[in-house]
Image: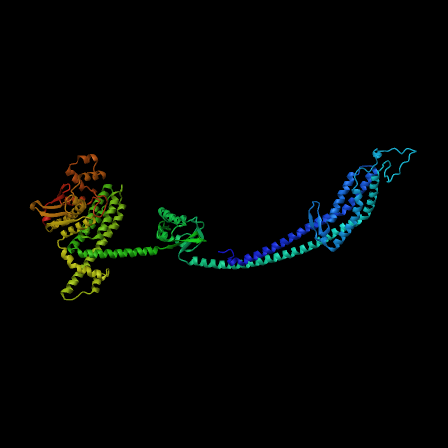
Amino acid sequence: MGILDLGRYKGIVFAITGFLIAFIAILALNHGMAGRFADNVAGVKFLSSLQSQPAEIQANAAAISARLANGEKVDEAIEALRTTATSFDHAIIGLGGGMVSDSSGSTLSVPALDSEQARTLVADGKKVWEGYKAKLDPVLRFSGSPYAAEAAAPAPAPTPAGKNAAPAPVVEKEPGVQLSPRGRRLSSALEELNTYAAASQAPLTRVANELAQQVETESNGKASVLRIIQIVGLVGALALLGMLFFYFARNLRKEEMVSLRARKETADILRTVNEGLFLLDKDLKLGSERSMALNTIFRREDFTNLSFDNLLKDIVPEKTLKTAMDYVALLWGERVNEKLVKTINPLNEVEVHFDNPAGGFDTHYLEFDFNRVKSEGSLSHLLVTVNDVTKRVMLSRELQESQEKAQAQLDLLLRILHVEPDSLTGFLTDADVSLKMVNSILKEPAREESAFRAKIDGIYRQVHAVKGEAAALGLKTVEQRAHAFEESLSDLKGRPTLSGSDFLPLVVKLDDLFNHLAQVREMLGRLVDLHHAIASRRAAGGTVEAAKVDQWLAGKHDQTMQMQALSQQPQAEAEGAGGLERTLEDLAAKVASSHSKQVTVKCTGLAEVPEAYRRAVKDITIQLVRNAVVHGIESPEDRAKAQKSATGFLGVEFTQRGNEGFELVVQDDGRGLQLDRIKEVAVERGLITPAQAAMLDPRQTMALIFRPGFSTADRVTTDAGRGAGMDLVRILVAELGGRVGLASAGGRFSKFKIWLPASARAAA
């Protein structure tokens, strides 16, 4: 902005400038006339001293005459007369042209002495003084002694008689003083001087007096003019000041009205806007102007002198607060790329908590947006915009959950279409039994710690069985829920003490599993009904309309996916023959794929499993197949190093041994059991001591894998890591009255052999 670009302040600046110029002009005039007054005062003073000098000259001449009459020395008196006369001579000569010389020799201009009347008076005075100077000249030029030689004595003797003495040429003032001829001439000059001085003193005094009166008269006139000028200037200055005051008042009033109107408009905007708006200064203090929505958003009324960290510290976690303060500090950097920094805003959607009257807290979500405000090229404030986006977040989450639920149902539908109906029906029946067993265990009263631990183990076995079979069938949603149930059980296991209230969250998870399985069962029923309807229409030579299909599926999935699923149904049913064999093959393929492995499964004799052993054999083989793929079969790279084929082999064989019962063998060609690793893990988990580990033989070491909680996996996944699978195998075999055998060769194979009795129940 240019120096003369004054904008709306131009009038004010010009008015003040005019006032200052007028004020300076008055001061300059006053200063000039004050200087003239000083000159006039000096002139009056000079002329006053000039009035007394003629009398002083006359007095000095009379003093010389008196000394001469008394026979005293006249040198000093003549010198005094010379000084006085010279001073008066210089003074009266200097009166010409309105100039005077003061006692210091400085020349002053006195305009009053330059008038015609003054010049006439000065000329008259100079004329008189010229005559005066002529009378003074003989006296002032005198030097030496005016007395005769014999007059040196104070009382000279009278002249002896008979001698002719020359008559004295001077008048003796005192008897006994004899003057020399030079002295007599001096005496005569003094008499003439005194006579002339007496006659000229009055004219010279009158000249000086009248000149002084003229200077004083002119000075008084100028003083009157100056007073008039000062009065006029003062009145003009006051008038101009009044005009300035009126102008300022009017403009200030106008500006105030504009400001009030703008402030009212701003207040109206800030009162009605739904967003929280405020400014942050460099000290991170909130500005005085802010929107009323802040009161509602932050549930507080007082924001005076409030800092940004104090605004947030009671409603967000400490970590979030620190991140927010670091981000705001980053925004104050001069070289910060604002657009880039805004993309990493950690307060874009921040969760906050407000205390409520009930003693709890309400959760809300706030969105903060920061904009840098610059003034004259430098950063001055941050404009902060706050919105309560709780509804948006909740709606987004509900939408996401709905989409995830729809996708999960679609995935479940597609998976169900690929599962053999008998296997799925069997799973739903077995899972329902397992979950009812879990419900019974939860209802059992318990008071002692051991009873609580026993409840956990019982629930774990049932849930793990459901999880294993769901994984085998590819029912991902069921598997995930069962895995979450196991997570809660693991948390309970890790607690030092347990109480009945600790099991309450399990009831919620159990109810979720029941509801989800009910949805699977309902969807299976719809698919069965739909399949029958389609089969009936085709048998009658008719067609099935898409709208009918939508009605059967309750409108939950789009038509394209539904028809693709329906078109795959016959193929899925054809490929699903084999029941448990297909389940184990799918399970092995899924687990192998998730661990980047390759495996081939060969099942033999599973169709001959008695009904009484069907569920147990299914649970046992699922656990052993999964365990073999995860821990036994190596990766293709490792198998290549061991000179094995890239694809591992897994065999499952069920054989009837007549009166001896039944034999179930699960064998793989993997790395075998790593005995040293088993001992190491058992010691790490506190199952045995290092001393006990050193004393174990291979058979005892292999038996450790059946201990509850034992697992050589590095981390917990849905496939392994909790040490529950082999424990479940051991319990199932024990409940059936059977036994387990285990053989392994490092780097070659692992083989599990299970004998089941030929009981009456099995025969049935």
Give the percent coordinates (x, y) of residue 208. Answer: 76, 50
Number of numbered tags placed on the structure image: 0
Name the residue located 30 percent from the left edge and 56 percent from the top edge. 398
Q: Residue furthest left?
A: 658
Of the pair 514 and 295, the residue shown nearer to us = 295
Of the pair 212 and 97, the residue shown nearer to us = 97
Asked which colour scheme the image uses, the reply is rainbow
Q: Residue furthest right?
A: 162
Q: Is residue 703 visible?
A: yes
Give the percent coordinates (x, y) of residue 725. Answer: 19, 45
Q: Is residue 618 visible?
A: no
Image position of 381 (left or right of 484) = right
Image position of 35 (left or right of 618) = right
Of the pair 746 and 271, the residue shown nearer to us = 746
Give the percent coordinates (x, y) of residue 374. Answer: 43, 53
Q: Quadrant of residue 551?
A: bottom left
Give the percent coordinates (x, y) of residue 172. Answer: 86, 39
Image position of 316 (left or right of 469) = right
Name the residue located 21 percent from the left edge and 35 percent from the top edge. 690
Q: Is residue 445 above or below residue 691?
A: below
